[in-house]
């Protein structure tokens, strides 16, 4: 990849790739003597003085020294970095003859999945997230290509959904499913990172693993693959059941970190002590909502496989409502008898269908009033929860909201790939390429354009568009089961046609 800008400076060269990439600078230098040195600095952003910030906010220090021999030297780095800018420092004895970047990522044909509308901001957000998924998917669904370079389970739930839409392939998803399933040998409740030697355990993430399995089934209809990992899903439930009290709710899940959200300042004041690694004694909302959600997903898997139901999610739902729902406020509290209701305590019951009958609209109103006072990963569940009960306009307006908590703020602060937090300074070590923030990709495709994977219908998906009028004309191209589809909305005309690359929908 050629840099967008290469500029001579007093002591070397300045390089701008034009956007965040994952890869490395490849150089060719001519030295008039042995032992000459070239200093190479890379960074995701510039300092106020316009220098490359190589001692990066995410915790990496991208500064390397290249020692030359006399004559022509070529640098082909073996490792990769997440960066946009480069600075090359050298003495008069050295001539830099070539500067380019080697870009790497899991294969993605960018023409397969595109999104265009009459709203430039929406298109920019889609592109922002697309870049994050592209450069964050390497040998796995990376947390980020800088600080951690690890595959986190919770991150993968969001990233995989976006990546399958963008590529039309479930290969990486299946690799991810298997790698986390293998950690059951360490603990049936699974590790939070795989593969790798970091023995981190996050209860919230473990309880999301069945979602990965169901994502594969929704896109492929492959019951055999689903069945082969069903024992792992059951093993997760059995592991957490050891913390259940008499009514089935979990109390002090102490063997794993109870995350709720990250960073801590985006937990919306959640009223329960969540110190690491041991959570405080007692029963709290989010871990139980996620546990019941996992039970519901395992029950769904059993129904698909024709296996007798092992659990009673409805009984757990009733216990959850008795424990956390406030008749006085009409929303859920963070802990039994508490008075504080964090956003998170109401996202998951709406997402998983755990609300008392007739209360969903009130809870959705609460989410909309609060806005995205949560982390970027949780925003996926926030948007999906609203979409689940038909609040599509709220979904759209949340995606394009111009507050400090949203994708527009990333754009405003100069993002070219989605970030770890809504703003650079909203986390002490924010990485500027973090695909766990890619929720708008599946939400815009599934809940706005209305292409919903469903193995139970002919063709493998339902077409139920909910495109707000203010978006104007919309065109979404997607790869699906080896075919390419186009979903359009053109000036209110609606019809369906057959095309040479699949079926072309022109939706109302």
Image: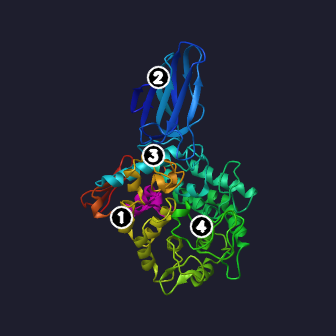
Magenta span includes 404? no
Q: Within 10 Å of the Cα at label 4, are there few (<14), some (14-19), or many (20+) other Cα atoms?
A: some
Q: CA distance from mark 1 to mark 4?
A: 35 Å
The residue labelled by disc 2 is: 98
Q: Are marks 2 and 4 in contact (CB under 8 Å)?
A: no
Q: Is residue 484 left or right of residue 232?
A: left
| Sequence order check, earlier mark of 2 and 4 | 2
Judged from the image, the secondary structure of the residue bearing numbered disc 3 is helix
The residue labelled by disc 1 is: 397
Q: Which residues are magenta?
A: 439-464
Residue 477 in sight:
no
Q: Residue furthest bottom?
A: 328
| Sequence order check, earlier mark of 3 and 4 | 3
Percent position (x, y) of residue 468?
Answer: 31, 64
| Sequence order check, earlier mark of 3 and 2 | 2
Q: Are marks 3 and 1 in contact (CB under 8 Å)?
A: no
From the viewer's perspective, is residue 221 above or below residue 93? below
Residue situated in front as seen by the camera: 242 or 82: 82
Q: CA distance from mark 3 to mark 4?
A: 35 Å
The residue labelled by disc 3 is: 131
């Amino acid at each position: 990849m050629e840099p967008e800008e290469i500029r001579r400076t007093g002591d070397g060269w300045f390089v701008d790739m034009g956007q965040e990439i994952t890869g490395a600078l490849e150089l060719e230098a001519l030295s008039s003597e042995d032992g000459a040195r070239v200093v190479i600095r890379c960074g995701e952003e510039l300092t106020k003085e316009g220098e490359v910030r190589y001692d990066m906010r995410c915790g990496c220090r991208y500064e390397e020294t290249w020692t030359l021999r006399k004559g022509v030297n070529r640098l082909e780095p073996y490792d990769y970095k997440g960066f946009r800018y480069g600075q090359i420092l050298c003495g008069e004895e050295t001539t830099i003859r070539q500067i380019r970047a080697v870009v790497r990522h899991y294969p993605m044909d960018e023409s397969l999945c595109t999104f265009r509308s009459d709203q430039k901001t929406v298109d920019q957000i889609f592109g922002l997230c697309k870049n994050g998924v592209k450069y964050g998917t390497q040998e796995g669904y990376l947390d980020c290509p800088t600080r951690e370079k690890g595959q986190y389970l919770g991150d993968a739930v969001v990233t995989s959904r976006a990546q399958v839409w963008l590529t039309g392939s479930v290969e990486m998803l299946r690799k991810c499913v298997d790698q986390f399933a293998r950690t059951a040998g360490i603990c049936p409740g699974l590790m939070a990172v795989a593969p790798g030697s970091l023995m981190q355990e996050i209860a919230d993430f473990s309880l999301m693993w069945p979602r990965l399995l169901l994502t594969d089934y929704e896109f492929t209809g492959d019951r055999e693959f689903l069945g082969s990992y069903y024992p792992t899903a059951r093993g997760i439930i059995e592991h957490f059941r050891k913390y259940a009290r008499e009514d089935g709710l979990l109390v002090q899940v102490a063997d794993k970190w109870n995350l709720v959200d990250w960073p801590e300042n985006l937990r919306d004041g959640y009223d329960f002590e969540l110190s690491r690694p041991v959570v405080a004694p007692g029963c709290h909302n989010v871990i139980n909502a996620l546990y019941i959600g996992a039970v519901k997903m395992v029950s769904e898997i059993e129904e698909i496989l024709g296996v007798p139901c092992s659990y009673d999610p409805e009984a757990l739902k009733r216990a959850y409502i008795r424990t956390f729902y406030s008749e006085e406020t009409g929303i859920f509290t963070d802990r039994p008898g508490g008075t504080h209701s964090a956003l998170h305590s109401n996202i998951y019951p709406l997402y998983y269908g755990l609300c008392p009958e007739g209360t969903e609209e009130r809870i959705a109103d609460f989410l909309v009033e609060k806005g995205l006072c949560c982390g970027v990963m949780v925003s996926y569940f926030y948007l999906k929860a609203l979409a689940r009960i038909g609040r599509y306009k709220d979904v759209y307006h949340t995606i394009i909201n111009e507050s400090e908590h949203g994708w527009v703020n990333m754009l405003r602060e100069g993002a070219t790939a989605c970030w770890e937090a809504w703003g650079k300074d909203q986390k002490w070590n924010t990485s500027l390429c973090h695909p766990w923030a890619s929720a708008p990709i599946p939400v815009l495709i599934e809940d706005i354009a209305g292409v919903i994977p469903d193995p139970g219908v002919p063709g493998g998906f339902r077409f139920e568009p909910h495109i707000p009028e203010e978006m104007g004309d919309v065109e979404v191209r997607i790869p699906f089961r080896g075919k390419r589809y186009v979903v359009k909305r053109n000036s209110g005309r609606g019809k369906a046609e057959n095309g040479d690359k699949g079926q072309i929908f022109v939706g109302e």
